[in-house]
Amino acid sequence: MKDYIEERVLELAHYILENESTVRKAAKRFNISKSTVHKDITERLQDVNPVLAAQVHSVLDKNKAERHIRGGMATKEKYLRLARTT
């Protein structure tokens, strides 16, 4: 693995842990695709630092379990905004 990829993988992992970030937020923050973040975190990080990979995986699992709640809240806010404008 090239050095710059390894550095990016570690930066992503630390960012996700510190901010309990989603894949989408991390991708936006680092200006890379969600696919790249996912591959970095699920495949490459395991080779670089297995302990860190397990910690990041637990954050992503938590985010995945909560995503239906965040989606429902976003929809609710959307319709509340629409109701205020009409």
Image (cartoon, helix red, strand yellow):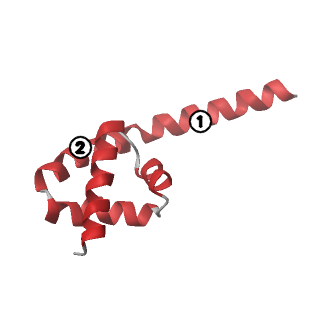
Image spot of residue 56 (x, y percent):
24, 47
Instruction: Single out the residue that lies furthest toward the left.
Output: 51
Q: Secondary structure at mark 1?
A: helix
Q: Earlier in the sequence, mark 2 or mark 1?
A: 2
Instruction: Single out the residue that lies furthest toward the right.
Output: 86
The 10 Å Cα crowd at callout 2, few under 14, some 14 to 19, many 20 or more, is few
Q: Is residue 38 left or right of residue 47?
A: right
Amino acid type of disc 1? Ala
Dot 2 and dot 1 residues touching (CB under 8 Å): no
Q: Nearer the viewer, residue 2 or 19?
A: 2
> To which quarter of the image does residue 10 belong?
bottom left
Q: Quadrant of the N terminus?
A: bottom left
Question: Would you name the residue on which mark 2 appears?
Answer: 58
Instruction: Single out the residue that lies furthest toward the front.
Output: 3
Question: Would you name the residue on which mark 1 appears?
Answer: 74
- Relative vertical location of residue 22 with respect to residue 50 in this rendering, above or below: above
Image spot of residue 80 (x, y percent):
72, 27
Q: Is residue 66 left or right of residue 56?
A: right
Q: Secondary structure at mark 2?
A: helix
Question: What residue lies at 50% left-to-right and 53% top-to-bottom?
Answer: 28
